[in-house]
Image (spheres, rainbow, N blue to C red):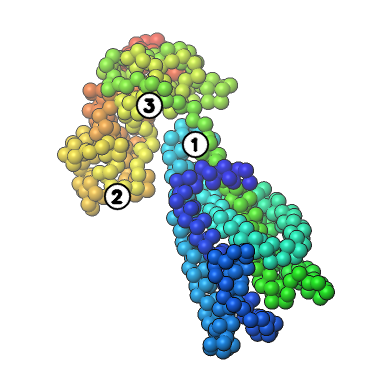
Amino acid sequence: MKEFFRVMRHFVTPYKGYLAGSLVFNLLSAILNVFSFVSIIPMLQMLFGIDQNRYEFIPWSAAGMSIKDIAVNNMYWYTTELMDQYGAATALLLIGLFLVTATLLKTGCYFASVAIMVPLRTGIVRDIRTQVYHKIVSLPLSFFSDERKGDIIARMSGDVNEIENSITGSLDMLIKNPILLTCYFGVLIYTSWQLTLFTIIVLPLMGWLMGRIGRKLKHQSLDAQNKWSETMAQLEETLGGMRIIKAFTAEHKMTARFDRSTNDFRDASNRVAIRQASAHPVSEFLGTALIVLVLWYGGTLIFSDHSPIDAPTFIFYMVILYSIIQPLKDFSKASYAIPKGMASVERVNKILNAENPIKEAAEPVHTEGLKDEIVFKNVSFSYNGTTPVLQGVDLKVRRGETIALVGQSGSGKSTLVDLLPRYHDVTGGEITIDGVNVKALALSDLRQLIGNVNQEAILFNDTFYNNITFGVENATMEQVVEAAKVANAHDFIMESEQGYNTKVGDRGCKLSGGQRQRISIARAVLKNPDILILDEATSALDTESERLVQEALERLMSTRTTIAIAHRLSTIKNADEICVLYEGRIVERGTHEELLKLGGYYKRLNDMQQL
């Protein structure tokens, strides 16, 4: 429970006003509930003809009497006055109307206490979702290489929904029930301390039994949520790999794998649901047992010669005691629901508490552009801390130059360019821009300097206009059109149904590979970065698309500092310097002609492509 209260303290603080309102209305509801039941005693006294006394009105300020005795006396006086004036039947009706009115007020307060908690519940769930999303956006790319997208989606959907249903759904129980139990127990002690003492002795046994049943629920719920994540991860993989599944006729294999996953989830959910379903019958049985025990003990008191309680008061006592059963049942439900929800909190916290190794400098240096050069000094990097990906890389990129990186797959080319915008941090050496270590620069300033055109053009399910202006504030239509023209994209955009307002589909599925790439180039043109990173931007294109994209890239590169990764050597022949990477090291460098004369790695790559 300690973890539960810590989570609640963190998320409930912005909604203290709602919490206070709920406390007030629940308190009023409890008081009115007790007050309405008090009217039962004179009803019963009159019905059974037990009380034959004549009462006189006592002033409320009378000395020598407690306010309780004065209130009881005057209540009976009012009752006898009603009986004398209107008759017993009418008096009963009027007392019944009083009970109905008190109940109406009580239920009104109860409704208000529930309604005022709705913004609190929905607000907490919204806050959790937004915090998780903000954290996801802020985490480095390395986090997502270790996590499956389906699992993250499951935490954002299933786990947050479970928190809403289990934990925030239990909040009103945790606020209302202590108030009700305090009020009811106070009335019970005041009515008969002997019966109440007996009740308090029996109650801990009920709590112990309920605790034993709910003890394993958190572990079982965590297992069920993990199985749900596995199911969502498989769904996400299926949607992303549908073309391969169809191509290899692997539908049966995938459905069998998904069926196993859903069956595992069902089995885990069954265990949780069965244990949770036992809460109501067990609490119902224990509540009935408690009532029977108290009835037996109260009966022995009434049958004794010197009974401390009369029959009508005992019936009132039993009514109040029965009213305690429901709050106790609610507590038992909460004792099941909260551990179930805490399993989801644990999974959500794995994202919220994830460490972000990319730290912003305490006093970051701000920069407005690249003025001189980018320098990689003895740069080393490893993803896992043991296997080196880059070792002792030295590279200088002067303003306006185009530097090309070539080499076999896995030689570290993409990793090297990912270190510049700090998608990862170097594990050895340093990278400087105009003599300032990139770790000292403001992260937003650093990434604003850099534009990316990758092998896979990543587009969003939005319009051409919004994809091109992504990340650029206040761009005019004229600027967007100009960027599209530079990228050789304007013509096919205008041929679409709604021009720049046409949606491109999920990840640009309505476009060809070349068209997607030209939209991403237009996006980079509009951003107008000082530094341009091209990561195999034309390797997946056909000849005609490559020609159009290459023309667009040459226009884009003409006024910028460019680092280009290429497999097709024909695209980087005119680079100012070509660096050949092999197993994380630069083994050759020079112009196209110089490297051919060396007769090393680069010449072998060139000869293979010529063949």
The nearer-to-camera label among 2 and 3 is 3
Residue 530 vertical position relative to residue 276 in the rendered view, above or below = above
Q: Residues within 10 Å of mark 3 (few under 14, many from 20)?
A: some
Query: Which quadrant of the figure contains the C terminus?
Result: top left
Q: Residue 474 location in percent, x, y?
A: 22, 38
Residues 353 and 597: in front is 353
Q: Is residue 96 visible?
A: no
Q: Which residue is mark 1?
A: 144
Residue at image position (42%, 25%) is: 360
In space, the residues marked 2 and 3 are separated at their CA atoms by 31 Å
**Which callout, 1 or 3, points at the residue further toward the start of the chain?**
1
Q: Position of residue 499 (x, y in %)?
A: 21, 48
Q: Which residue is mark 2?
A: 503
- Disc 3 designates what residue? 443
Please, which residue is most extreme toward the front here?
Answer: 63
| Residue type for callout 2 | Lys
Going from the N terminus, do you reach mark 2 or mark 3 first?
3
